[in-house]
Amino acid sequence: MGAMQRIIPRVIRGTVKPAFNPRLPIGLRRRWLELASQANLAPRDCRYEASTLGGRPAERVRAAGPLSRNVLLYLHGGGYFMGSPRTHRAISGRLARLTGATVYLPEYRLSPEHPYPAQLQDALAAYRALLDHGVAPQRIAVAGDSAGGHLALSLLLALRDNGLPLPAAAALLSPWADTRLDGESVGGVGANDPMLTPAWARLSGAEFRGGIAADDPRVQLLAADLAGLPPLRIEVGSNEILRSDAEGLAAAAEAAGVEVAFRRWEGLWHVFQVHGGLLRAADESLAGIAGWLKERWA
C-alpha cells in the first residue's frame, strides 16, 4: 500500500465525512462538500464552461487539443442531496482529457426539496437534448458515481422502456443500487468506510424517495430487469459500504445478458477516482474507463 493510500482516508474522515453528517443543516453540508472538493486536483488544461442542457444549468468540460465527436453525459454523486459539477471536476476533467470527448454534467434537482422522480426527469431531459442537438446515440456514453451511478442506471432503464435510442455504453463508479441497504458490505464494512455511514445512507435514501418504499422497483435497481442495456463498466472499492451494490449489480447484469466489465479495487474507498493526480489507482481506474469508453464509441 502506497503512502497516499494510507493518508487520503484519514484526510477524508476529517475534511469530507462531516459533509455527510445529518445533524448539520443541509445548506451547510452542501457548502462543506463544495469547499472540501477544492482540494481535489482538477486538470488545468481543461475548460469548465457554464452551459445549459435540457432546461437545466450544466457544465461543459473540454480538454485542450482536438475534440472527438463523442459526448459523455456524467451524472455526479452526492447522495442525491448535494454535489455538483464543481465537486467532480477531478473526474470530469480527466475523462475529457483521456477520451477527447465533450463531457456534460447537468445540475439535476436535489432532494429533499425535489424527491424522486425529479432527478430522473432532469437526466432524461439532458439526454433528449443531446439527441435534439444532433448527437448520434452511438456517440453518447453515460457515466455516474454513487447516487449518480443510480441515476445513470435509472436513465438507461427509462430510455429502454420508452423506446428511446440507448447510448453506446455506461460507466458506473461505486454505484448505489440497493435502496434497501441490506447488502453484506453495509454491515461488513460499516464504520471502516472512511466516508459513508449506513445511517446516513438510509436517511438520504429516504429523503430521495419521498413517499416511495425502499423496495419499489422504480428505485430498487438490484431488482430491475436489466436485459437489453448497453455495455456496463462497474468499478468499486473494497472498503466501502456500497461494495455489495456494485457486485450485485454486475452479477445481475451479466445474468441478464448485458456485457459487463467489473473491477473491485482492494483497499480503496468510495469514489476514490476523485483523487486522480494524487492516487495512482485513481489515475489507473480513469485511464481504464476512458480506454473502454473509446472502444465502445468506436
Image (spheres, helix red, strand yellow):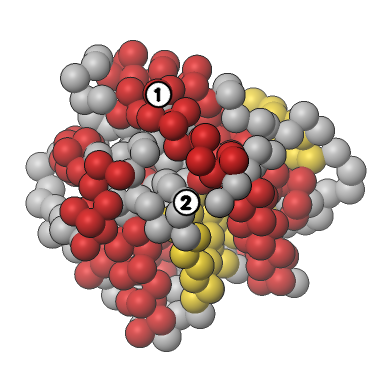
Residue labelled with disc 2: 268
**Image point 50% across, 17% down: which residue?**
35
Q: Is mark 2 on a helix, strand or loop?
A: loop
Q: x%, y% of residue 24?
A: 24, 16
Q: x%, y% of residue 164?
A: 47, 66
- Which residue reaches farthest right? 65
Q: x%, y% of residue 211?
A: 10, 42
| Residue 68 seen by the camera | yes
Q: How far apart are marks 2 and 1 (CA)?
A: 17 Å
Of the 4 image quadrants, the one containing the C terminus is bottom right
Position of 119 with respect to 85 (left or right) is left
Q: How many marks can you see?
A: 2
Q: Which mark is residue 114?
A: none
Neighbor class of circle 1 (other Cα within 10 Å; few <14, some 14-19, many 20+) is: few
Report which quarter residue 114 is drawn in.
top left
Q: What element carries label 1?
A: helix
Residue labelled with disc 1: 14
Q: x%, y% of residue 242?
A: 32, 54
Nearest the eye: 207 or 173: 173
**Image point 60% across, 47% down: which residue?**
2
Q: What residue type is labelled 1?
A: Gly
